Image (tube, helix red, strand yellow):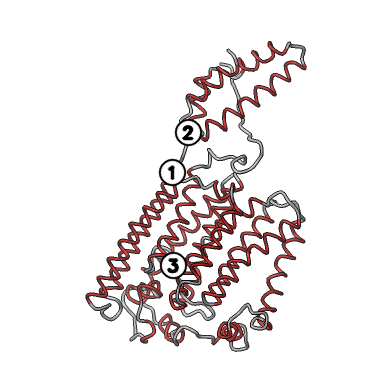
């Protein structure tokens, strides 16, 4: 059988077009390598080629076996966790809207919040399904175009929204910079110290955009996420640099940057005056007593100490804590239903975060690893910061928590991140390093004689 005929027959057995192209090219390379070896043993080129093809085995059996390997996969366990938390989130929204800790909202306002969140959740699941189907490798093929294009979009949004809206909305938009940043890191992989420096500078673009539109700690969360992703890429050896020295230098750089912002932020035109005052308050001598969210921290800290294992333990709330469904869902569960219920909820969230990282870190493809890790980092940071703020931890404020808190844009953005994680898993046996870049594939083929 001729090589082209053999490859056509094998390819016909593989349903996924993307995998079909990848497997065909690798089989052709494998046959050529084997043919060269036979020629070195004294065969003529035509004899060597025919023998190499014969050694590949029956094309239908080979194609069928490769089709079982190289096909899309759905991570059912992760999807089930997502659906469970989506249902839990709607249940909590219903309870915070209609019952709350002391009666909930008025009828019309409760209906407004509840019905809108139902719509947002259904829309979010639809967005998740769409992102799951879409090829995430576009992030690796056009990383700089997507990065700067999205930056322009965010710049326009930042200058058309009023500041009071920007506190939450712009933060949710900015979190999508992290999977885009994964594409940037992938673009500069296998390069040296200059590439690491460029990637470090890229990480500050969403940070400084955030400083102009959202509160300081929200920008620090974004910077921390990008910085962590860069450290992981260096630690995994994606750059041709000395790991220990580079990581040490990267850790020192943001410390110096924060000190400059602390002392010269307004002089450099980077920070607004109110942001500078807040930054100085956070990192000043009274940092443990810092309280910027309406005097709620003392109430939260006192309430935490009185939580019951089961049942309600809530004391009258301050007026600043009115919107439970947005900012204090975790506190609501602990105060209304007890430590056992609240701990169970946090355990499910933690299991989801761990599963997201597990999916990402098992990827052999570096783009899939980076994109999945970026999305996992965003979701985990949101969970940790929100829960910490709900327990009265100083220096942090509740922004949004995946699945549980109210918000249209936050819900849709978080489902985009979840869809990307599922897309990474879906393509784990389909996407190779060659997608979006020049490289080689490796498929191990073994034939056993019966």
Q: Which mark is residue 215?
A: none
> Secondary structure beneath disc 1?
loop
Left or right of 266 on screen, residue 112: left
Left or right of 208 on screen, residue 72: left
Q: Residue tagged by mark 3?
A: 401
Residue nearer the viewer, 169 or 425: 169
At which x and y percent is residue 261? 66, 79
> Secondary structure beneath disc 3?
loop
Q: Mark 1 vs mark 2: give the one in front.
A: 2
Q: Mark 3 vs mark 2: give the one in front.
A: 2
Instruction: Please tell me whether residue 293 is drawn above or below residue 172 in the rendered image.
Output: below
Quarter of the picture containing the C terminus is top right
Quadrant in which residue 85 is drawn? bottom left
Q: Residue tagged by mark 2?
A: 16
At which x and y percent is residue 357? 53, 55
Alpha carbon separation for disc pair 3 and 1: 25 Å
Residue plotted at (68% across, 50% down):
189
Task: Say whether marks 1 and 2 touch (CB < 8 Å).
Answer: no
Q: Residue tagged by mark 1?
A: 74
Check disc 1: other Cα within 10 Å, few if <14, some if 14-19, many if 20+.
some
């Amino acid at each position: 059988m001729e090589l082209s005929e053999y490859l056509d027959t094998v390819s016909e057995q593989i349903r996924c077009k993307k995998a079909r192209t990848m497997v065909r090219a690798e089989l052709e390379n494998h046959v050529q390598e084997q043919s060269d070896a036979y020629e070195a043993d004294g065969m003529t080129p035509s004899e060597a080629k025919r023998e190499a093809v014969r050694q590949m085995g029956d094309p239908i059996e080979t194609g069928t076996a490769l089709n079982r390997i190289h096909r899309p996969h759905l991570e059912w366990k992760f999807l089930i966790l997502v659906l469970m938390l989506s249902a839990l989130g709607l249940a909590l929204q219903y309870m915070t809207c209609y019952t709350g800790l002391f009666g909930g909202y008025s009828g019309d306002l409760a209906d407004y919040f509840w019905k809108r969140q139902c719509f947002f959740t259904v829309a979010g699941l639809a967005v998740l399904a769409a992102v799951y189907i879409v090829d995430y490798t576009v992030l690796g093929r056009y990383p700089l175009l997507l990065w700067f294009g999205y930056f322009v979009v965010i710049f326009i949004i930042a200058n058309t929204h009023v500041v009071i809206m920007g506190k939450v909305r712009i933060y949710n938009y900015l979190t999508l910079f992290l999977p885009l940043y994964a594409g940037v890191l992938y673009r500069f992989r296998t390069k040296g110290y200059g590439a690491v420096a460029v990637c470090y500078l890229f990480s500050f673009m969403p940070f400084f955009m955030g400083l102009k539109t959202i509160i300081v700690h929200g920008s620090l969360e974004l910077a921390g996420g990008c910085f962590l992703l860069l450290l992981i890429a260096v630690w995994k050896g994606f750059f041709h640099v000395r790991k220990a020295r580079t990581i040490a230098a990267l850790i020192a750089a943001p410390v110096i940057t924060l000190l400059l912002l602390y002392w010269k932020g307004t002089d450099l035109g980077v920070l607004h005056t109110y942001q500078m005052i807040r930054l100085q308050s956070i990192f000043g001598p009274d940092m443990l007593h810092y309280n910027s969210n309406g005097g709620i921290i003392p109430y939260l800290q006192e309430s935490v100490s009185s939580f019951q294992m089961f049942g309600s333990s809530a004391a009258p709330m301050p007026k600043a804590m009115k919107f439970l469904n947005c900012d204090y869902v975790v506190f609501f569960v602990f105060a209304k239903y007890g430590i056992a219920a609240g701990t169970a909820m946090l355990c499910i969230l933690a299991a989801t975060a761990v599963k997201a990282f597990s999916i990402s870190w098992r990827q052999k493809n570096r783009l899939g690893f980076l994109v999945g890790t970026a999305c996992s980092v965003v979701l985990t940071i949101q969970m940790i910061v929100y829960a910490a703020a709900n327990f009265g931890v100083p220096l942090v404020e509740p922004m949004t928590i995946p699945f549980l808190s109210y918000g249209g844009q936050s819900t849709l953005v978080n489902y985009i991140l979840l869809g990307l994680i599922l897309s990474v898993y879906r393509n784990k046996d389909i996407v190779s390093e060659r997608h979006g870049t020049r490289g080689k594939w490796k498929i191990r083929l073994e034939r056993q004689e019966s």
